[in-house]
Amino acid sequence: MDPLIKQILFALLTIFIVLNYGLIVQGIVRKIGARVGRRYGIPFYQPYIDIIKNYSKRTRISHGIMYYIAPVFRLTGGIGLLLFIPVIFGNNMFQNFSFSGDLLLILYFQFFGVLGMALGAAESGHPNSAIGVSRGLSQVTAYELPLTLGVLSLAVQYNTLNVSEIVAAQQGGILNWSFFTNPLASIALLLAFLAAMGRSPFDVVLAPQEIPIGPPTEFHSGFLGVLQLNRAIFPIAKLILFMNLLFGGATNWGELIIKTFFIYMWSVFVGVAFPRFRVDQSVRWYLGVPLIIGVAAVVVSKFF
Amino acid sequence: MSKLFNIKEDRSLFPEKNEQGKIDIDLSSHKYLKLWHGPQHPGITGNMSLEITLLGDEVMDCETHVGYLHRGFEKLMERRKYIQCFPIVCRVAVPEPDFNEYCFASAMEELAGIEIPESAKWLRTLVLEMARLASYLMWIGGQAGAFGQGIIGQWTNYLRDSMLDRFEELTGGRVYHMYIIPGGVRGLLPSGFKQRMEENLKFIEQMMKDVERVMFNNAVFKKRSVDMGIIEKDWIYKFGITGPNARAAGVPLDVRKDNPYLVYPQLDFEAVTATHSDIYNRADVRRRDLLMSVDLIRQIMAKMPQKGEIRAETPNVLHWKVPAGETYSKAECTRGEYGYYMVSDGSEYPRRINVRGPSYTHAVSLLEKMIINCNLADIAGLMVSLHTYPPEIER
Amino acid sequence: MGKINDILSPFTAWKHLVNEPLTVKKPLEREGADRYRGFHKNEIDKCIGCGTCEDICQNAAIDLVPVEGIETKDGDSGLRPKIDYGRCCWCALCVDICTTNSLSMSNEFKWIDEDADNFLFIPGADDKPWNNSEKGWKKPDYNLYDPNRVDMQELHPEDRDKSFIEIVQGYSKEQALKEADRCVECGICTATCPAHMGIPEYIRAIRNDDLEEGLRILYDTNPLPEICGRICTHKCETVCSVGHTGDPLSIRWLKRYIADQNPSERFKEILGTDTIEQNGKKIAIIGSGPSGLSAAHYLALMGYSCTIFEKLPLAGGMMRYGIPEYRLPYDQIDKDINYILSLGVEIKYNVTIGKDNTLDQLHKDFDAVFTGTGLHLGRSTRIPGTEHKDVHFATDLLREISLGNEIPVAEKVVVIGGGNVAMDITRSMARLQNQKFGKVNVIATSLESEDIMPADREEIVEAREENAQIIPGWGPQSIEIKNDKITGLHVIKCLSVFDEEGRFNPKFDENIKDFFEAEMVIESIGQGMDLSYLTDEIKENLKMDNRGRIIVDNNFQSSLEWLFVGGDIIQGPDVIHGIANGHKAAIGIDNYINSKK
Amino acid sequence: MSKEHTEKRIVYSPEGDPIEVNPLQDYFCEDLPEVHKASSIAILENFRNWARSRSLWVLGFGTGCGAIEMRPLMTPKFDAYRYGIQWRPTPRQADVFVVSGYLSVKTLKRVIRTYEQMQGPKYVMALGSCTINGGMYWDSYNTINRLDYYLPVDVYVAGCMPRPEALLAGFDQLKKIIREGRGEGYNKYAEEFAWYKANQKKIIKDWDMPDYNW
Amino acid sequence: MKEIIDRLQELYPIGDFKQQNKSLALITVDKDKAVDFITRLKNEEGFLHLSIITAVDWLEKNKFQLSYLINNPTTKNSFVVRVMIDRENAEMFSIHHLWEQAATYQRELKEMFGIDFPGSPGVDKPFILEGWHEIPPYRRDFDTKNYSEETYFPREGRTKNVPAEYMKQKLYPDE
């Protein structure tokens, strides 16, 4: 078989696995949140049914061509991010399309979906969407700073822009993980991660009490289904990225699931306990402690 | 450290206010965004709406729209006999119907010259305090929820529900109790009630400690609520502000103390106050008021007579003619002074009943003022912190 | 420090992760509280369809509808509440005010339906899953109307048992208002009242303190309110819905209150009968009892000129001559009769038809004849010894008392009978004994046991208060006569009076015997009619049933179309039936005369 | 007052663009709702119905007092989430409209608007006496008496107000209806659109919604 | 409370003083002097808190009664200041300059009773009702039941029987 086709097939397999994992972990996380609230919460498979339901809707209305494309953009952002991240270290087939400068592309893809969404949301004509998008963009910009600085610090540390190589450099024991070798960058990255996951206190984008529910206000039926798929894939892609950057990657799916789950739980852990920041507060917050830590991380890894 | 980045805002782009303190808004300038909050909006307390004009994230102008819940109670009561008004008054304010029942019944009793039996007084006080407790519990969840902290609402709504179970046991109704009937109350405590109530109160106290830790000792919550939405002290009388909103500003307005009714003179409590009425202060006043309610319920259950008549002798309710006259009966509800102004012309039907809901002033004139220059994100929090219930505005 | 605490302390929320959820596991199986106001139940046999629930419902959620298997009868409208759950608010006021305590609520609260039209149902009649539920809201300990009757002021037994002064004092205004306030205005009583008086309406008039309106309502159906207000058998009170869980309303006393409070000289003005257009037709009425007076009143209102022929020196018939003065003072009879006379009715006293005048003559002289001659003949038990001279009929004695004649009074008297007449003679004898001997020794004995004695309850109670002995449940056997003097009455235990089909068929236990000492025996077991004034010719043409009663149609017209018959000889015996008969006969006569033209 | 309200006027879009509005014109009627038939492949439709019944997204619009029982429903005591019932703050994404009690005319206007924004198949659950026959406000000048004249109702829950348990039972019934393929209320609305509109117009004389949103 | 009135009696024509209960008294003031009087009570007698403004429709007398309920937070006493105004072209002076919330009350009174308060901010804007074409609904000559039955499709299937009439029909129909 042509290696490229094989590569594509394996990439599709990755997407499939990640999608299912994403949906299940989404259900489980909501269940955990519900447990803290002392109730049972949804069945863990509820996200599946929701997606089927949304695709089963019979009517849909359109607000124009960008409105159609926006969910696709968003999903592309998620899948794109995933496809350029090496998923399983040491397994050629699950390297996806990782290449030597993939770290930069990945940072770009973080933004890509949001931008696509911005276009679509603007076209949907709902003011809440517009406000949500502007909030989303400002917040992404804000947390992108510590995120980039953290990544930069790691790039300097490992002297590479290739995720696979960063992972490779962390092999050989827990203490080799960047989390321990570069704690400053790790803190900056993990703080940025909170906003990247869009949970409290940084969930001002959706904020049901203020602008129900932000950018996807007008999306429904199949469109919403696409967004939901993305909502399953995108966080997992980010989780895999953070796992690769900080926690030594994974050599098999089991390890991946365990590690990503715990990273996920970090955002849940914070999210359950805190209310949300206003957008100006979260921007200011990211321009504060995380930024300084990020700068410090770069400085430290460059000069020490 | 983030103070470093607290750059002073450049407000040169913001428009000047005119003499009325408002801004001349020209929507066609493309500077402004008009936004409707509600009625279908999760951040709005109940079914009402705010017409907001935004400049950036900041509210430039706001108009409250009410009337989505208007049922014409005051008109309906004019064509119902007095007893027939009794089941409908509780519908005026859904989360705490008992204050309506009490105010209606006491106004009517005053006009008719009826003295209710002692144990009925105690039971009424008990029910009013239970209602206060239940209402505050739901409110606290709402306040946290308005700032995006759902977990508090999960806990406190359960606590409220446990109070509703007690209500159900005592009054026969879950939400609409229809318990304080003109002339008295509709039932004695069922057996084992006190014990179950005590269990509830213990659990409430225990959970409220958690709420304090998670909500009130919370950096983000403080950041959102401290110095936000301040009610100035000199607004209190200017806007007719009552209840916790006023008490948080240091003005101890509490009808329970000022014009004591029922058995409040025999209970030991103080009006809860704070210093400057921002969102956090108001939340804190309500939390302490809630705990005081717990204490009051305990006091009532310890002191109340175990047996006794529950309803005074009244004329046949089917043709009860209340002597002509007018009166105003008020009670302290969770939001402030709740009052019924009743005019009787001596017939079987009330001539006019006017309901004073504290939200009337809080949600319209006060909110419209406070919301100016407020951030879009804070509207929900601000509105909840005024504790408004739309149904009592429009009735 | 505080700041760090503010960051860390929210995480304590996570301790609840390991706690068991507080959720109700099976919410659909959760029951309402014991006192929960859920869906309605109705004990349909207990319910009387009074409609009080409908009246109090502020949502107009309750309709009264006929239900299969429930018949309309006295005291039961045959209707049952049907509740619209598109209106109900579950306030349970309908339960609280239910007069029979039949309505209640279950603690069931789940009713889901796709068709909104289904939310109408008749509790108790429709098969609903909660019909057998034990829990739920029941009528609480308080009352939304007063179930207790306002006590009537009466003379103390010591004060009254020597004289014939009226015992019952009548209501004061406050008492009347309070008593009238208890009425729930269901109107069940109207059907039971033979005259179908507008009872709720005149009680409302009392409540509104509009006694003139009350009087007008009374005279609509009853021209003898003073009399009825005192001695009516008040069948209405036996069906009063308020009486099911409390005391029935004192409808009779309230009626009396209206009549008493209106001054007799203003009656004509109040009732608007100052001028009546005469139509020139003449009607003869035989007997000035309730039926005759009633017929005369309504005929007079219609413009007929009426002449009443009365055998005795004063008008009133049995009301005057059968009822002792302590129950019905003569001046009150006069008040009612004088008003009727003021309408232009003429009474010819001391005229006995068949002796002083004949029916045929009346037929010739008048356009129509109404006869209401009543039951004036006593009936005998026909036990051995009744032919003795010291054995009397109650009616004869009562008439003699009223006429002011001396009557024989013995030291020991036994009265046979348990009806109101028996009580009247018992209590009259007691008074006379008291006057004559200073002590009372009178025994009234009846076949019926105490619970089914036909006399009014209060009569029995009052008689006992006056030291008469009431010994029910004995059947008279024979009167013992020694030396031509009565010494007593032999009785045996009566087990039951009526058989299973409700016919009079007493059963006795011969072994249980008793003997009541007496020097005088009075029989009061019913009265017979005296139709001797009917000539043979008339009798031939007149249809009568096998018990000798004249057959009349709905308008009390006999088979001789000019002859109308009413009162005790047709229905009764009591005043209110007489009044009702008279009223209907008046309408019948009017129809008859109009049709003749 | 009433007259001015029905005259043409200029309103502004959120961004400030002027739009001429004729309050008497039925904008919503220009694009009539269509009937969307169920798929003819039974097994597919059954599967979809199953998914629809297991994932009921309820619109967060507390129209009347029944809204107070929504919180217990979604919080620990009754926790409707475990039955696939979830909250949705926007009408576009919601499947179930819970009309929680009485509707004033002013709210009804918004309710109709909101209902029309929802995507089919959509379901209406009506709570309490008020939606069935007016309830305690049967004689009020400002509340409607029966909801089925204005919107197709799938399921009614009796009570004033219905308890959360009754609501859950109502949802159970709704699920049953959906699984049996009977949840076609929105098609009924499309079919009898003229009738519904006539009823709605009888009480809502001018359809002038303030500006663009509500 | 009486002493306040006695003191002010000379300045203002005050009628119908009635001490309703310990802390509430009812007084009637002429329309022209009412605002002056209320201002005086607020500024000099310490009646700082306005509880309600409402109206009562005395259709028989062809008058509206306006009731201002003001409260003294220090002495805890309240007055109901009653002002009778004509029912035709009902108009009253606004007191929105004394209390901010008065404007809302006045707006509601204008809508529900048709009493005008010239100069009160936003008094002509609809407050609670929307698209209301009938006479103001709180007026006593507006029949809400009638209006509801004509407008809102009451559900069919209801039958009405009055027990007394039904019994007459069943038991003695021709009497």
Image: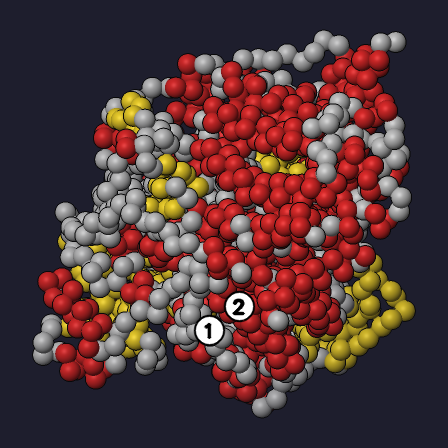
Residue E118: x and y in percent read 15, 50
Q: Is residue C80 above or below residue B291?
A: above
Residue D200, position as x, y percentages in the image: 43, 26
Let me know if residue C105 appears in the view: no
Which residue was labeled with disc 1?
Answer: B274
Residue that mark 2 sits on: B284
Q: Amino acid at mark 1?
A: Ala
Q: Amino acid at mark 2?
A: Asp
For mark 1, name the chain. Answer: B
- Image quarter where the N terminus of chain C lies is bottom right
Left or right, residue C505 beside residue C221: right
- Bin the neighbour count of mark 2 within 10 Å (Cα to Cα): few under 14, some 14-19, many 20 and up: many
Q: Nearer the viewer, residue A266 or A274?
A: A266
- Based on the displayed image, in which of its 4 quarters is residue C596 positioned? top left
Position of residue B101 in the picture relative to residue E67 (left or right): right
Q: Are marks 1 and 2 in contact (CB under 8 Å)?
A: yes
- Say which residue appears at 45% left-offset and 14% top-offset: D31
Q: Is residue B100 above or below residue B252?
A: above
Q: Can you name the residue that lies furthest to the bottom here?
A: C438
Q: Residue at horizontal 62%, vertical 52%? A: A296
Where's residue C178, x and y in %?
A: 45, 69
Colour mode of the rendering? secondary structure
Vertically, is B5 above or below C509?
Answer: above
Q: CA distance from mark 1 to mark 2?
A: 8 Å
- Asked if residue A296 can be seen in this view, the reply is yes
State left or right for residue C446 relative to residue E17: right
Q: Residue furthest front?
A: A303
